[in-house]
Image (tube, helix red, strand yellow):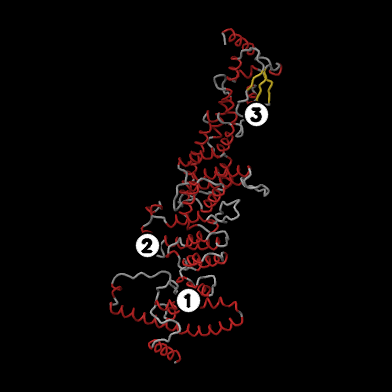
Amino acid sequence: MGLQDYAKQNIMISKFLALTSMPISDVSSDVTIEIGASSFALHKFPLVSRSGRIRRLLIEAKDATISRMNLSLIPGGPEAFELAAKFCYGINIEITLSNVAMLRCAAHFLEMTEEFVQKNLEARTEAYLKDTVLPNISNSISVLHRCECLSPVSEEINLVNRLINAIANNACKEQLASGLLKLDHNFPMKTMPNIEPETPSDWWGKSLSVLNLEFFQRVLTAVKSKGLKQDMISKILINYTHNSLQGLVIRDPHIVRGSLLDMELQKKQRVIVEAMVSLLPTQSRRSSVPMAFLSSLLKTAIASSASTSCRSDLERRIGLLLDQAILEDILIPANSYGNNHGTMYDTESILRIFSIFLNLGEDDDEDNRMRDESEMAYDFDSPGSPKQSSILKVSKLLDTYLAEIALDTNLLPSKFIALAELLPDHARIISDGLYRAVDIFLKVHPNIKDSERYRLCKTIDCQKLSQEACSHAAQNERLPVQMAVQVLYFEQIRLRNAMNGGHNQFFFGTINSQFPQRSSSGAGSGAISPRDNYASVRRENRELKLEVARMRMRLTDLEKDHVSMKQELVRSHPANKIFKSFTKKLSKQLNSLFRINNLKPIGSKPNAESRFLFQRRRRHSIS
């Protein structure tokens, strides 16, 4: 612009200044401000007296008689400009929490600074921010929420960072003050009346749910860096996640999965879940994040096809706290939509979660160094130790889970067997839960291979079955013959131990026994001489052989009865050949069992020693 044009503009502005004594209403509008679809017929003088941007645009304009200006880029749009124009005309405007961010950004855009007039719009909004907004957490969150649609101006003037830092600082101050109040309240000499617990409706953490994901992440990162407690951070995460994912559920059954709407919602879910997982507190065995929340995140992560690292992080967190889980926490649906032959539950994730728990070491527990000396006295392999008690809880949880997934007709036997074989031998005191799960699986899957059936039943320790479970297993036609023989054998041993007063505690299934008792050290361990010990072993061996011989004689009598019954059944119904085959197979297994114990097979005559012992026992029982 030349000097002549610049001089003309100055003359024009001087003419406007000469009109200061005239009322604004008596002067016709000479400029129209266009903002999007809205237009404002105004006067140049009031605008240029407070806005440096409008003054500069008029000076830089080639046409001195410019009558239209476009300010579509003003933050806040027509609403913000209307309030700023009223301020330029001297009209008193009310600055509130809902418009202070918009007015602050508009003042920056229009350059309404102290350079042109004192107490301009920028100074007025700054005073309101310092006095009303920044000292209060909820007010800061409300104004920060308004800044979401004022980018990038709100970032340029550093308003967003100031609000986030104010929230973090005030939250930590409130935490410190609350701790001091509780500390003073615990001393009798300094009673604090009317101290009421913080109610959920007054909690500032709930206000964070109005923020978008980006601002929420920045706020949570700031409060974590300032030292906010992890339990408070967990509550904030749970509240925000619940409110964010609640509106992303398709409630219209007519919407087909795989549609554009469904894919968009799935993408939003995936972004939210991955962000929440990245903000979770540090992994620990004493984490403040509830198991139910972690389980919900994992279910959503699988349903929304989240990243592998996100799912792995959640699986590890759940594995660290697995002894706190219930069945509902680990019933994770599989992401198999569109596949009619898919399984109902994600067993692969559960397999990894249980493996993580079983492979935990001392390095995984950050609190081991802080453990009390009394806790250090625990033997972590003993039944009463914290680790063993956790394993027992997890074993019951796994057996319940196996019984639930066994109803799935599409579940492969290999996956079920992998879960059943996962726990070590000492993890189960009693195997009734596992037996129930295996029985359900065999009932739902009658066509599995014999090798898979045998391997599946091999996971059950027959010595740990209760009397009711043994009675059921002995008559269960779905079980292999080998297992039925084992059940009968160990049940007979159990009965013998019960008759002898329960002194032999070798078998897990004996009465009032949980684990093999360890031999005590000291003088007591040497009280029995080697000769007496050997004699005791020989005596127990003879008693065991006698018991087996007596059982063999009873089985011989039963076999005779079965033979006659079998002949009658075969004559009456040819289809009972199946029963004949089963009886023959059972006899073979029993004979092999007796041969292992150096006894004669069924059908042979008992030796003289067995007859003598049997007759003596019979005379003694009669007398």
* Mark 1 vs 2, N-terminal side: 2
Horizontal side of residue 138 vs 79, given as left or right: left
Instruction: Tell which tag, 1 or 2, sits nearer the viewer.
Output: 1
Q: Position of residue 302 (x, y in %)?
A: 54, 49
Q: Where is residue 274 in the image (x, y as percent from the top left)?
A: 52, 44
**Depth check, front residue: 36 or 225:** 36
On screen, residue 375 above or below 571 = above
Determine the residue positioned at 38% across, 88% down. Answer: 608
On screen, residue 525 above or below 286 = below
Instruction: Tell which tag, 1 or 3, sits nearer the viewer.
Output: 1
Instruction: Quickly name the residue at label 1.
Output: 488
The reply to whether the C-beta atoms of the residues labelled 1 and 2 are less than 8 Å apart is no
Horizontal side of residue 159 vs 514, given as left or right: right
Instruction: Tell which tag, 3 or 2, sits nearer the viewer.
Output: 2
Instruction: Quickly name the residue at label 3.
Output: 79
Instruction: Give the SS element for disc 1.
Output: helix
The reply to whether the C-beta atoms of the residues labelled 3 and 2 are less than 8 Å apart is no
Instruction: Quickly name the residue at label 2.
Output: 379
* Mark 1 vs 3, N-terminal side: 3
Instruction: Give the SS element for disc 3.
Output: helix
Give the residue type that dot 3 points to.
Glu
Mark 1 neighbour density, 10 Å: few (under 14) some (14–19) many (20 or more): some
User: Spatial distance from mark 1 to mark 2, Cα to Cα?
Assistant: 35 Å
